Amino acid sequence: MRVITDTADGLLAAAAHYLEELLAARDFSGAVKYYEANRRQLETAGSALAGRILRLVARAHLALASYPTALRLARMAQAIHSEHGDTLELAETFLTVAEVLRDSGELKQAEKAFRDAESIFRRNDCAEGQSRALNLLAGLYFRQNDYRNSLTVLMEAIGLAKRLDDRKKLAYMMGNIGRIQTFLGEFAEAKKHLEINLTLSEELGQTLEAARAALSLGYVQMQEGDFAGAETTFQKAAAGLRRVESPRDQVILRTYLGELYYRSERAAEAAEMLESALAAAEAIGRETTLTGRVLRHLAEASLRVGHDRVAARYAARALAILAKTGEMVEQGAVLKVQAILAERGGRIAEARELFVKALDTLHQSGVRFEKAEALVAAGQSAAFDPRKRLTCLFRAEEYFRRGGMQRRLEEIDRLLAGTDRLRPGDAPGAAARTSEVEFLTANEQIKRFKQQLSYVAKSDLPVLLTGETGVGKDHMARYFHAICRPDGPFVAVNCASIPETLLESELFGYAKGAFTGADRDKEGLFVTANGGVLYLDEIGDMPPTLQAKLLGVLESRRVVPVGSTKEVPLDIRLVVATNRDLQAMVERGLFRRDLYYRISGITFHLPPLRDRKEDIPLLLRHFLQNCRRLAESPLPADVIHRFVEYAWPGNVRELNNKVKRLEVMAELAAEGDLSELAHAVFGDPGRDQRSSLFEQVERFERQMLIEALLATGGNKSEAARILGIHEATVRTKLKRYGISLEGGALN
C-alpha cells in the first residue's frame, strides 16, 4: 500500500496518477483503500490536484454504488476547482456529480449538472468532453423515458464523435441507439446497433461496455422469443461482469435471467434468480427503480405459477416504490399484473379500469414493447367485449410487426384465430370493386396487413398509413374502401395541396353568408364522404387550428359548417396518410397528441420499394400490360435486372413512370434495342450505396431543425428549447446545413 508522506504537488500528482491506474484496472476497492490511508492529507490540501484526487475517489465510490460518499467527495472537488478556476477539471467534476445524482435517483439535478458540464466543455472547445457529456445526458433522458430528447442529444454527440474519429465513443453511442430502439419496439434495428456496440467494445477491450451490450442484446433476443440465443448472450454478459465490479449491472443480469426462466417455464430457477436480484438491489437502495423493477418481475413470475396472493403483495410493493421514482414503464407493467389478478378474482369492473390505466401509463411512457404486452393481455381479457379485444390484438400486432418480431406475430395469429371475430360480410359489388383496386404485392408484411384490413373493415377504427412518397398509400386507401364500403363514396383530400385559408371550408363546408363570397350553402367533404371513406393524405401538414377541429369532429361524429350552428351527423370510415414521423412531431409539439391517439387506431408503415424487391417483377408485369409496344415481347433479362437492382427513391410511382418512359422511347425507336433503351432510361448504373449512419444522422438533424424553426416562426432560442439543445448549437447547425432564415422563410 502506497502512503503519502508529503503534500507537495509532485507527490499529489503521483497520487492522482496512481488512482487513475487503479480506476483503469477497475480496482475500485483498492482506490478507496488507498484514499482512506491518506485521507487526512488529501482533504486538507487545497490545490487543484487535491480536487482531482477527490473526484477520482468519488468515481470509485460511484462504481461501488456508495452514492452519499461519492456525492460528498465530488462536491468537495467541485468547490476546489471553482476556487482555482480550473475549468476542464471543473467540467469533469460536474460530470461525476451528475452521474452520482443520476444513479441515486435525483434526475432533475443530474440533468442540470450534465448541462453545466457540456456548457463548460463547449466554451473551452473540448469536443471530446462535450461528446461525453451529451452521451451521458442522452442516457439520462433515456432513463426518464424521454426517448425523443435522448435521440436528439445523441445525434449531436454522434456528430462530435465523427469529428473526433473516436471508435470508443461510437461504440457507446451505438449501444445507446440500440437501447432506445429497443424501448421503441424497433428490435431489428436495435439488434444491428447492439451487435456493432458489442463487436467494437470487444475489439477495444472495453469489458464493462461489452457486458452491457450483451445484456441489451440478450434482452432483445428474449423479447423476440429466442430464449436459447438470449441465454447464451446473457452468459457472455455474466462472464464479462465477473471481471469487473458493477453491482447495478449484476442486478440487471439476474433480473433478465429471472424473466427468461419464468417465460420459458423454469419457475424454480426464476424464483431463485429473482430473489437473489432483489437482495442485491436492496443492498444498493430499497426505494429505487431498480428494486421496483425486480419486484415487478417477482410479481410476474408468481402470477404465472398461480401464486396470486404472493403476486399481489409483490405488485403492491413494486407500485409503491415506482410511484415515488416516477418510472412509468414499470408502473404500467405492474398495473397490467394487477388487472389480471383482479379478473382472476372476479372483479371485472376493477380489471377493466386497471387495464385502461396500464395502457394509458405505457402510452405516455413511449415504450412500445411493454404497451404491446399489455395490449395482448387486454386482448385476452373478459373485461372487454369482443370488438375491443380484437382492437387490442390488432394494435399489439402492429407493434410487433414494426419490431420485426415474427414469433410474436405468430402468437397474435393464434390468438386472433380463437377470438369471436366480427367478419365482414359480402357487400354487393365488393368482389368486383376489390378486384379493380387490388393492391399487388408479394411482400409478407403487406399481405398480412391486407388480411388484417379485412377484419378491421367492420369496426370503426381509423387507419393510419405511413411511408415514403410514392409507396402506394393512396392505392391502399382505395383498396380499403373496396373491401369496407364499396357502394359508398371515396373522397380523397390532400391536406398539403389546399391553402390553409381554404382547407377548413373545404373539409367542413360553409353556410351562406359565412364570409365574403359565400352566396350559397356548400357541403363540405366530410358530408360528401357520408356512407363511405374519407381519405386525408399528408395529415402531418394540417394546421394546428384545424387539428383541434378535426379531433372534435372525429369524437362527436358530427360536423358544423363554417358560419352555421346546425350539426350534420356523420357516418364515415377514416383513412389518413403521411410521409412524416407523426410520433416525433407529437413529441416536439408539432402535432396534437390527442389527435394522433385518435387517428392511429390501425397503423401500418408501407415499406419503400427498395426494401420489398420481391414486388418489383409483379408490379413491372402489371404496368407492362398497359404498354402496347412492350407487352408484345418479354423484356430482356438484363433489363429486368436493372429494374430489380435500382434503388427506386420515388418508389412505385417512379417505377410506373420509368415503364411509361421506356414505352415512349420504344415507340419512337421501333427497331431499338431494349437494353440500350433501358440504359437511356436509368442512366449510368453507378453504385447503389446506402447512406452511412452519419449521413442519415445529418439528414435527420436537418429535418428536426427545420420543423422546430417552422413551429417557432424562426425563433432560434425557442427552437433550441424544443430540441433540448443550446441556442449556440442551433446557430452552428444552421450554418453547417446551409439553412437560412432570410425574409422569415426557411431555405
Image (cartoon, rainbow, N blue to C red):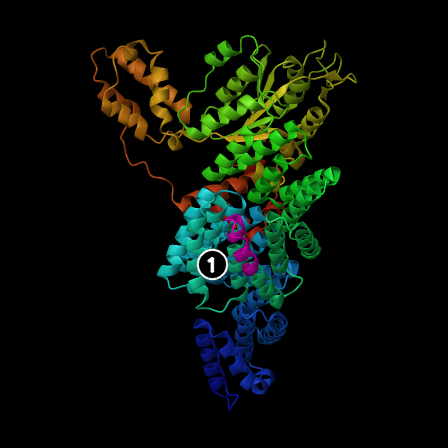
Is residue 418 depicted above or below 632 in this figure?
below
**Region of the chain picked out in magenta, as a range:** 261-273
Is residue 169 depicted above or below 633 in this figure?
below
Kind of element beneath mark 1: helix
Q: Position of residue 403 (x, y in %)?
A: 49, 40
Give the residue displayed 55% in from the left and 27% down from the top: 577
| Nearer the observer, 380 or 498 | 380
Is residue 670 depicted above or below 95 in this figure?
above
Give the residue displayed 54% in from the left and 38% down from the top: 742
Q: Amino acid at mark 1?
A: Arg
Which image quarter: residue 209?
bottom left
| Nearer the observer, 45 or 33 | 33
Disc 1: which residue:
212
Q: Is residue 381 magenta?
A: no
Is residue 476 depicted above or below 742 in this figure?
above
Q: Is residue 265 magenta?
A: yes
Q: Is residue 588 visible?
A: no
Q: Is residue 428 visible?
A: yes
Which image quarter: residue 387?
top right
